[in-house]
Image: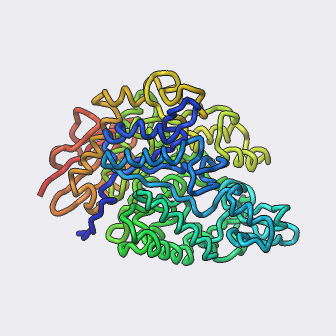
Amino acid sequence: MINEKRAWWKEAVVYQVYPRSFADSNGDGIGDLNGITAHLDYLKALGVDVIWCSPFFASPNDDNGYDISDYRAIMPEFGTMEDFDRMLEGVHARGMKLVMDLVANHSSDEHRWFIESRKSKDSPYRDYYIWRDGRDGREPNNWGSVFSGSAWQYDETAGQYYLHLFTKKQPDLNWANPKVRDEIFDMMTWWCEKGIDGFRMDVIGMIGKENFDDGPMAPGALYGDFGPSCMHTETTHKYLREMRKRVLDKYDLLTVGEAGGGPEDAIRYSNIDESELNMTFYFEHTDGLCDHNELGKWSDHGSPLNEVRAVMNRWQTALQGKAWGTMHMSNHDQPRQVSRFGNDSPLWRVKSAKMLGTLLHMMRGTPYVYQGEELGMTNIYFTELAQYKDVEVFNAWKQWVDSGRVHPQDMLRWLAKIARDNARTPMQWNTSPNAGFTTGMPWMPVNPNYLSVNAESEVNDPDSVFNYYKKLIALRHTYDVIVYGEFVPLLEDDPSVYAYRRVLDGDTLTVMCNWTDRNAPCALSDDSQGEELISNYPDHKPGFLFPYEARVMLKRK
């Protein structure tokens, strides 16, 4: 029996909006804040409690807004501060909350801090970033960046190298400088005073760099791993506890960290004493055991049930009674979940999208719905490099294809499967040109399947993915066992069925999901498990699950 402390953010369902691709209100082809405001009733109808917006701050967009040049200004493409205030007011008027993206591990190289920092070693902003002399005519150490290539960039004006764990236009901030922490905490307080309801903290597990030693080299790797020096360090935890005391404890916020790592790391970040964050994202089921190889994430390994289940069950059981978690299979950095984990063919897309939604929303942890997931939106399957927009794609192509290590057709196949741009195609609102996203030329092509996959048709179809998600969310708001129940894994060696139980105060919830496009034997699938709460099939066969069938049964005490 788990004695779980109750909190609103544990009972909430969060919806992630990627502003550039959500809705364009002025016909310039780029989503904006007024576009979000215009669709708040849609989100309210879905039943979500919290809207998390990816960055909308001033940015040159080298990494689609995750390179911020002014933390207190709105990107002109997205609108004005008045537009933001109106959006926030609309969110609150509908009884929902707004979480903003905090990108504080790095800034843009066009931020005034960096512009001043590079001018001189005597600049008062020099120590806002991490500058180092070279070593033997090369970079200060062997670290590679997340987006391929070296993590160091030589700056002619400064006469030194600066650290960038991401693109060279995203120099890392030096959190060891108290003035930097003062700036970040003041900025966070400013937004809290405007009325926001929380922070999703981008790569927050990297802020505490403890040394600059060479990193270990994986077989076949071109650069060393910065992880041992920069990931989940004691210094990071010290900074987060300071953040908690100076900012977070003063407001009733949802705080979620993009931290990664293993369960032991999540327990430290989101421990039950609430000295750091409410919860963290983990990525072992997306970036970890399921896909990574010597080329990073680039492969067509796929996501076998036995690997996904082992990871997710381990996290579910490890965090119980020790930390709160998150549930997700997609976001702006991942491909569409129905294309990756399910089956996006016309025959099975709806069934498998509902199955994956069932699997996630019945688990422990706060569920996160990425825009379009509730419609069963799919990968776009580009076939040429020129169709992509993402800096990660072009950096990876340069590192692996241009060097001759990977055949172009292999990389194109992998990109079509797991590139981030798959999640960034415009939201599919209706069957009008450009799926109703814009009256202009969309910044990224609309998935051609918008004629059959769109919000307008799904909202009015009782058997749609949208209305299934609406029911999943309503069930979570109704039954405490779904939120606070103990997680008990079942059928852990079954080749086709992912099953588990949730138990609370004598109530037992049994969840069973067929991961395949074939009938699967399942002894749990009968009326002995209680009353059916939800299923993606109208009829059932005792002892079996139909292809991609999901069933949730509740036995009351």
Q: Residue at x 63, y 54 (%)?
A: 67
As displayed, is residue 155 above or below residue 375?
below
List x then y, in percent, for residue 444: 60, 34
- In screen coordinates, is 544 left or right of 332? left
For this orientation, the residue located farthest to the left is 557
Residue depicted at x 82% and y 66%: 158
Q: Quadrant of the N terminus?
A: bottom left
Picture coordinates of residue 12, whole percent (x, y): 32, 54
Dividing the picture into quadrants, the one containing residue 474 is: top left
Count of numbered circles in the view? 0
Location of the C terminus by quadrant is: bottom left
Observer able to see residue 347: yes
Res 264 seen here: no
Which x, y percent locates residue 64? 61, 46
Q: Viewer-proximal residue, 275 or 188?
A: 188
Relative depth, front residue between 378 and 424 = 424
Figure quadrant of residue 132: bottom right
Left or right, residue 412 beside residue 420: right
Residue located farthest toward the front when viewing the structure as drawn: 82
- 263 versus 380 height, above or below: below
Q: Is residue 531 above or below residue 3?
A: above
In this rendering, position of residue 542 left or right of residue 307 = left
Residue 472 picture quarter: top left
Residue 403 % position (x, y): 79, 48
